[in-house]
Amino acid sequence: MVLKMLSRGRKFGNDTIDVANKGCWEPYDTLACLRTGLLTAASTITLIFIILKIIRYHVFRNTRMHHYAIFYTSAIECIVCTTSFMVGNRFPQIELAACFLKLAIFSLVCHLHWSLAARSLGRPDIMQHVVNPVLCLYLLYCVAVALMGMVDVASSWIECQRPYWLMLSVADFISVQLFSIASLYILHRSGGVQRAPYRDLWSIILVYQISALLSLTFDVVMKLVGSTDSGCSGVFGHTQLFYSIIISIFGLAKFLVPLWTLLCVLQPFEDQSRASEVALATSYNVDGTSPPVYPVMGNFHQYDQMRLPNGLGQHVASLNGRSHQVGFVDMSFPDNDSSVNSSPTNSPAQLKLSGSPVQHKLPNFSSPSSVVPTFALSTISEESGGLEVTPSPSIRSESVEWRKQSKPT
């Protein structure tokens, strides 16, 4: 069907002057082949960097699913773009597929940032009731337009004047504006962010704004200036040099520069709790009652930063291929001491272990039955994969070195 559509342009006798149908294949042109080679090389190099980035994500065992989806889709887009740069003048369906993949990647970027913002603002319901439905409708629109464009193809003489290119460009431009407005609102509500996230966010906004604006301008000019008589080639004066320069800049700005930006902005980080993870299990009393809730430590390396007092425990040891072991902490309390206020503001949940020489005796929170509150140690073994819980020994100490943690304002 594509060959039949391409035969439409031959009745005008325009094969010789048409600059859009030339490349490294028949009909051959040196400048067109050079343009194709440069764009293909740039797309291939980008694909290599994306593959290396994906490998890094798997090495670090990163848990950010949005990043995996973005870079896997980017790899597919690079493959499609490489094919489009080589034979896109014969098969416009390939370029339409590349346009759709670009819009899909930007949808993933929007979902990534909006989901993070919704959680930080305490409004996760916005994702379910607003963002997800809007993005689904947006992708359905892009799929429908791309499929219609793939079915209703034309020759290279008038293909740029088809309405589907402009429809996709308008959708891209509108989505970028919505993303920019939402980002401004989020920054205003959150009172700003740190310098690095602020720079990364505005880098994405700026690059996609330029890409969307160039794409919209190009398609509007092709639609308004081009005609059936002069064709798409007439917009460039039937000059291959002018056409190759414009198309090269347009191809880089529309497809590759956004991918380069994502490669620089999105970085993997090592999930430090993935190997052999040690955490304090839920504290318990020997009679089965639950004591007050204590702060939860995130992972092994956070726990490793704490130092246990001398004589009460040992520093955390990290063993390759084995489960980590942690010294026990005796959380028993001596008899009542008037030197410490037993009000809720000085509860054990607000006290922090410290190496300070200042010692405080904590009040006795145990029941009259002399219940000994303790901690249990949970270890996850990399060899067996099982969870082992070991209760602490019933050793009582007269005091523990504590330092009051300042109450956040």
Image (cartoon, rainbow, N blue to C red):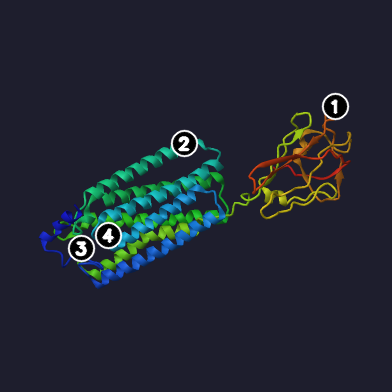
Q: Amino acid at mark 4?
A: Gly
Which of the numbered marks, if any, corresponds to residue 128? 2
Answer above or below: position of 31 versus 377: below
Mark 3 or mark 1: which is in front?
Answer: 1
Q: Is residue 280 left or right of residue 211?
A: right
Whole-number angstrom distance, CA of label 4 to CA of label 3: 15 Å
Q: Amino acid at mark 2?
A: Gln
- Residue 41 vs residue 179, the one in the foreground: 41
Q: Amino acid at mark 1?
A: Ser
Q: Position of residue 293 (x, y in %)?
A: 72, 35
Mark 2 or mark 4: which is in front?
Answer: 4
Mark 4 or mark 3: which is in front?
Answer: 4
Label 1 with label 2: CB-CB less than 8 Å: no
Q: Is residue 253 left or right of residue 62?
A: left
Question: Label 3's element?
Answer: helix
The residue located at (15%, 65%) in the rendering is 15
Whole-number angstrom distance, CA of label 2 to CA of label 4: 39 Å
The residue located at (34%, 50%) in the rendering is 100
N-terminal of the two: label 4 or label 3?
4
Question: Label 1's element?
Answer: loop
N-terminal of the two: label 3 or label 1?
3
Q: Amino acid at mark 3?
A: Ser
Residue 340 at least partly seen: yes
The residue located at (36%, 54%) in the rendering is 212
Which of the numbered marks, if any, corresponds to residue 233? 3
